[in-house]
Amino acid sequence: MSLDKILSTDTGRSPRKRVGRGYGSGLGKTGGRGGKGEGSRTGGKNRGPLFEGGQKPLWMRLPKRGFSNFAHEVKYLALPLNRVLARVQGGVLSAETIAASGLVKPGTAIKIVGGRGEDGLKVDRAVTVSVPVSGTVKAAVEAAGGSVQAAG
């Protein structure tokens, strides 16, 4: 047994391509990219899965019908009642007073929902709510002697 028999340099990996290093490398001149066209340019051959070789894609050929509410949808930020009551002082819960307390940015669409645990719906004072609320919050506020002006 000798060292040339037990130490093999064959790792099963092919050597990396040295592109554009002359004709002797086998990848000179065009660097294995061929002649002209999109594929020979930098950033070429970067087509998505819907590309159909220049033909009008299927998603553009199909008729567009129906209505999507995506552009008109109002997304509400859900705020727990106990968090709002801890932050806002006074008897009025409006979008302006909640924004002034620093809980949300002004102009954010909010909805007051019940919090977790037994303190989640605990109302310690009579408040007037003028933002959308859940049904459980409405019942808790009215039970404490408050009123809800905006139903959610």
Image: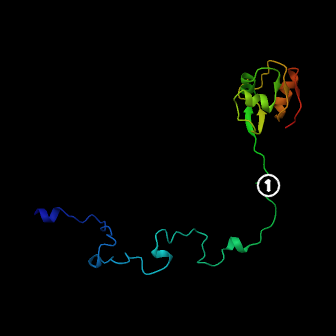
Residue at horizontal 70 percent and vertical 30 percent from the top: 103
User: In this rendering, is residue 97 above or below 39?
Assistant: above
Split into 4 quadrants, where in the image is the C terminus?
top right
Residue 33 at x, y percent in the picture: 42, 76
Depth check, front residue: 136 or 89:
89
Quadrant in which residue 26 is drawn: bottom left
Q: Is 34 situated left or right of 45 in this image? A: left
Residue 133 at x, y percent in the picture: 82, 34
Q: Is 29 situated left or right of 146 in this image? A: left
Q: Is 32 situated left or right of 93 in this image? A: left
What residue is disc 1 on? 69
User: In this rendering, is residue 87 above or below 113?
Assistant: above
Give the residue at the far left of this rendering: 2
User: In this rendering, is residue 151 above or below 144?
Assistant: below
User: In this rendering, is residue 141 above or below 110?
Assistant: above
Depth check, front residue: 57 or 28:
28
> Coloring scheme of the render?
rainbow
Quadrant in which residue 15 is drawn: bottom left
Residue 63 at x, y percent in the picture: 77, 72
Split into 4 quadrants, where in the image is the N terminus?
bottom left
Quadrant in which residue 100 is drawn: top right
Residue at horizontal 79 percent and vertical 33 percent from the top: 95
Give the residue at the far bottom of this rendering: 35
Residue 35 at x, y percent in the picture: 43, 81
Query: Hey, what amino acid is under mark 1?
Result: Asn
Tally the numbered discs: 1
Q: Secondary structure at mark 1?
A: loop
Residue at horizontal 60 percent and vertical 78 percent from the top: 54
Question: Callout 1 environment at 10 Å: few (<14), some (14 to 19), or many (20+)?
Answer: few
